[in-house]
Structure formats: structure tokens, C-alpha cells
């Protein structure tokens, strides 16, 4: 294969691809209907011309047939009058018109067939155009629906990476962060308050206990119960050490 053949094939392939991509179904269907209507107009004109020709041929046929009959009658009249030469001339004219009528009849039959064929083709083309218009509307609707669906799917596909959705995602992250910080601050504040109250409560218990101990040591509101004599007689040296330590603790508390 030569270089020019290959180059020509590449050019044709690229042109075909460009044409295919440029084809819009709606525009192509509209143009197809326009072309069919132009063909319909031409076919109607052809049918009209054929019918006009048929009418002229029919008129000529009727005229020559009438003239042939007329010459036939004249020949009979001339023969009745005894003029054979005139009768012969009339018969010659009759034959000429008869031959012409025969030819016209053949031509007229052909034209009738052509006209019938053209009429059938015209009716078929009109039916096809009507069907094509209906189909065109259906295909246009389907094409429009397909384009809308394609655009919708393309839009949905871009939502995941679009700046708008990205902004939503970023703002959602920020809201989550703010909520987390707010919750953390609330927990920290709540824990601090709880710790403070816990310290107050524990401090109050210690003070109460300390006051009770002071009162018991000084013989105040709390009366010290005496131990049974039997238990005092049973004290051991270790109990004496505990008593000494307790006495020392009392002295320290009294000095406070």
C-alpha cells in the first residue's frame, strides 16, 4: 500500500470520526424529514407532470379515434355517391388516424401505468414521512431524556470532588471539632467543680471530726464513757504505751 493511500485512509477515518462526533440526533432527524419532504415535493411535481401528459395523450387518442370514425363515415358516403376515388382517399385518412390512435392507445396505457406507480409511490412516501415524523418525536424525546440523565449522572459524579461538597465536608469537620472542644471544656469545668465540692465536703468532715475530738478531750458536749474496772485492771504494758501516746496527742490538740 502506497503512502498516499495510507494518508488518504487516515484522512477519511478522521473525517468520519469528526462527522460521527458532530452528529446531533435531533438535528439529523430534522434534516432527514426536510429531505423527505423535498423528495415528496419533487414526486408530487412528477406525478402532476405525468398526469398532465396522460391527459394530453388521452385527448389526442380520443381526437384521432373520432377522426378515424369520421373518415370511415365519409368513405361510406363517397362510396354511396359512386365516387370510389374519394372513398378510397377517405379510407386512407381513416387508416392514418387509426394507426395514430393505436400508437396513442399504447402510449396512453404506458402512461396510465406510470401514473398509477407514481401515485402509489407518492402515497407510500407520504405514509413514510408521517411515520418518520412520529418516530422523530419519539427519538427526540428519548435523546433529550438520555442527555438529561447523562448530565445528571455527570453532576452526581462530580459531587464527590467538587469544591461545594469539599466545603461541606470541611465545615462538617470544623463543626465536629467545635463540638468536641465544647464537650471537653464542659467535662473539664464539671470535673473542677466536682473536685472543689469534694474538697469542701471532705474538709467539713475533717473539721467536724476534729471538733468532736476536741469536745471529747475537754469534756464538752460529748461525754467520755468510763471503761469498766475489770478492763482497767487488765491493761498491759503495751496499753500503757498507747495511753501515753494518746495523752501526748491530746496535749498537742489542746495547744492548737
Image: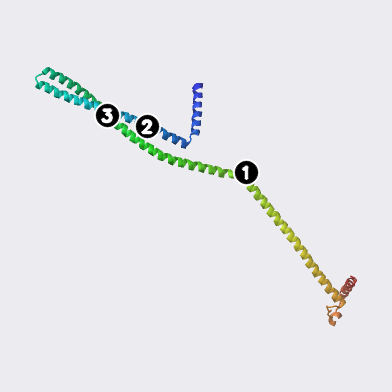
Q: Position of residue 186 (x, y in %)?
A: 72, 58
Q: Is residue 210 left or right of residue 56?
A: right
| Secondary structure found at label 2 | helix
The residues bearing labels 1 and 2 have C-alpha atoms spaced at a distance of 56 Å
Determine the residue located farthest toward the top in the rendered image. 85
**Residue at image coords 48%, 41%:** 144
**Picture residue at 79% right of the left edge, 66% below the top:** 200
Q: Position of residue 78 (x, y in %)?
A: 11, 21
Residue 185 drawn at (x, y percent): 72, 57
Which residue corresponds to mark 1?
A: 163
Q: Provide the secondary structure element on which disc 1 rests.
A: helix
Going from N to C along the chain, the mark reached first, 2 or 3, is 2
Q: Earlier in the sequence, mark 1 or mark 3?
A: 3
Query: Which marked residue is nearer to the observer: mark 1 or mark 3?
Result: 3
Crowd class of label 2 (few under 14; some 14 to 19; many from 20; radius 10 Å): few
Q: Which residue is the site of mark 2?
A: 41
Q: Looking at the image, is 218 positioned above or below residue 123? A: below
- Return the x and y of residue 251 as percentages of the image width and height: 90, 72
Crowding near the residue tagged with mark 1, few <14, some 14–19, many ≥20 C-alpha atoms within 10 Å = few
Q: Image check: 36 left or right of 190?
A: left
Q: Is residue 176 left or right of residue 245?
A: left
User: What colour scheme does the image use?
Assistant: rainbow
* Mark earlier in primary sequence (1, 2): 2
Q: Is residue 98 left or right of residue 170?
A: left
Amino acid at each position: 500500500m502506497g503512502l498516499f493511500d495510507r494518508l488518504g485512509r487516515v484522512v477519511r477515518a478522521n473525517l468520519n470520526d469528526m462527522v460521527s462526533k458532530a452528529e446531533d440526533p435531533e438535528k439529523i432527524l430534522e434534516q432527514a424529514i426536510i429531505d423527505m419532504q423535498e423528495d415528496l415535493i419533487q414526486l408530487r411535481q412528477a406525478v402532476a407532470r405525468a398526469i398532465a401528459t396522460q391527459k394530453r395523450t388521452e385527448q389526442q387518442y380520443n381526437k384521432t379515434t373520432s377522426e378515424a370514425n369520421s373518415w370511415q363515415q365519409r368513405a361510406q358516403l363517397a362510396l354511396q355517391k359512386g365516387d370510389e376515388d374519394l372513398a378510397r382517399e377517405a379510407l386512407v385518412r381513416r387508416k392514418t388516424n387509426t394507426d395514430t390512435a393505436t400508437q396513442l392507445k399504447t402510449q396512453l396505457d404506458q402512461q396510465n401505468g406510470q401514473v398509477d406507480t407514481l401515485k402509489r409511490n407518492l402515497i407510500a412516501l407520504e405514509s413514510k414521512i408521517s411515520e418518520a415524523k412520529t418516530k422523530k418525536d419519539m427519538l427526540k424525546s428519548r435523546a433529550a431524556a438520555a442527555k438529561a440523565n447523562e448530565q445528571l449522572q455527570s453532576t452526581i459524579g462530580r459531587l464527590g470532588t467538587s469544591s461545594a461538597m469539599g466545603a461541606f465536608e470541611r465545615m462538617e469537620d470544623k463543626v465536629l471539632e467545635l463540638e468536641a472542644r465544647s464537650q471537653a471544656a464542659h467535662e473539664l469545668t464539671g470535673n473542677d467543680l466536682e473536685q472543689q465540692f469534694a474538697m469542701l465536703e471532705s474538709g467539713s468532715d475533717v473539721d467536724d471530726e476534729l471538733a468532736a475530738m476536741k469536745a471529747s478531750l475537754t469534756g464538752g458536749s460529748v461525754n467520755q464513757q468510763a471503761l469498766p474496772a475489770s478492763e482497767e485492771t487488765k491493761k498491759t504494758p503495751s496499753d500503757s504505751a498507747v495511753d501515753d501516746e494518746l495523752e501526748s496527742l491530746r496535749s498537742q490538740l489542746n495547744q492548737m
